[in-house]
Amino acid sequence: MNRRLTEKLKFPEAIRIPYFGGVSYRFFSKLDNKLIGSSKIPAQPLNQEKRDIRVTASLTSFPARINYAHLAIKSLMQQSCKPDRIILWLAEEQFPNHTLPESLTDLEKYGLEIKWCDNLFGHKKYFYCIQEQKENEVVITFDDDIIYPIDAIKRLVAKHREFPGCLVCERAQAFPKKKTNLYNVGRWDTISDVACKQPSFSVCPSTGGGYLIPYGAYPQHMLKKELIIKYALKNDDMWCMFMAAENGVRFIKTRKYHKIFSLVAQSQTVQLATQNVVENASEIDFKKLMEAYPEAYRRIVTDRT
């Protein structure tokens, strides 16, 4: 069995099948980990051909996951649509001696770029790249704990060509129909028609799930560290949603029924998502952003198309 086949056999996210759903997920996740671990990196994992769109794949990691990040990066090096660059952003304060596992540094010979920066948590994966972004370049952000489907970049770029002025996401949660859990984005609708056929402001993108940023999509004040720290330091998804609405740029999803991701084994020791959803940090940040950016908030809650 190969990873393309496992992707076809997976259930869409949020479709709950008692017992069997959990068994199926664990089976395919374990299989994907085994397949990615034993597979070889292509001789040319980065794009070598001239094309009209340059693709920069960008992600970040931190000490609790650094020993497993190479598997996520390896899956990006096996994409059917090859990126032109793969950049891993690491915070100087978290790795003061720049000591990294060999499994990661070995990937530099295949083209991985490891860059050092300030600690902005999940914001690192887009913050620095879009400051240097060129007009013919798209930045696609990923996480360090996911084994990405082989066609992930291909789907994102294809949708970008169809909607060049939009932010494109593989996975997003839509503003809820019933207006319940309004301030807790982690509880919004996972399966929805919103932003599938028509672009919309009313979704919160999973920036680590494969998130394509076209040139000029975000306002310059999004790149002010003091504002990120003030409003949403540990909630980059929500910050990206509000800043897109603030700049008048809508989202489009690659598909309605997103398949469940296979997570890198043993990578889930620390999860900001748990803090944001369960410990109410998401609601606190949403209310701060709602008050600071009222026009963005209005667009988000009224554009459920």
Image (spheres, rainbow, N blue to C red):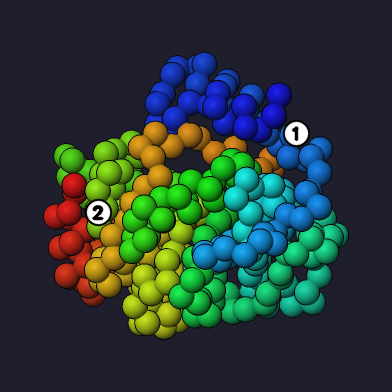
Q: Nearer the viewer, residue 72 or 62?
A: 72
| Mark 2 neighbour density, 10 Å: few (under 14) some (14–19) many (20 or more) | many
Q: Is 192 situated above or below 297?
A: above
Q: Nearer the viewer, mark 2 or mark 1?
A: 2
Name the disc covering residue 34, or none.
1
Q: Which x, y percent locates residue 212?
A: 46, 59
Q: Nearer the viewer, residue 236 or 83?
A: 83
Q: According to the image, label 2 marks what residue?
A: 200
Whether residue 72 is visible: no
Q: Quadrant for the N terminus, please.
A: top right
Specify which label sits upstream in the sequence, 2 or 1.
1
Name the disc covering residue 102, or none.
none
Identify the element where label 2 is drawn.
loop
Left or right: residue 257 compared with residue 297: right
Q: Is 262 situated above or below 170?
A: above
Q: Nearer the viewer, residue 104 or 51?
A: 51
Query: Residue at coordinates 41% horizontally, 55% vertically from top-left?
Result: 161
The three-letter code of the residue at mark 2 reads Ser
Left or right: residue 192 compared with residue 149: left
Left or right: residue 275 compared with residue 263: left
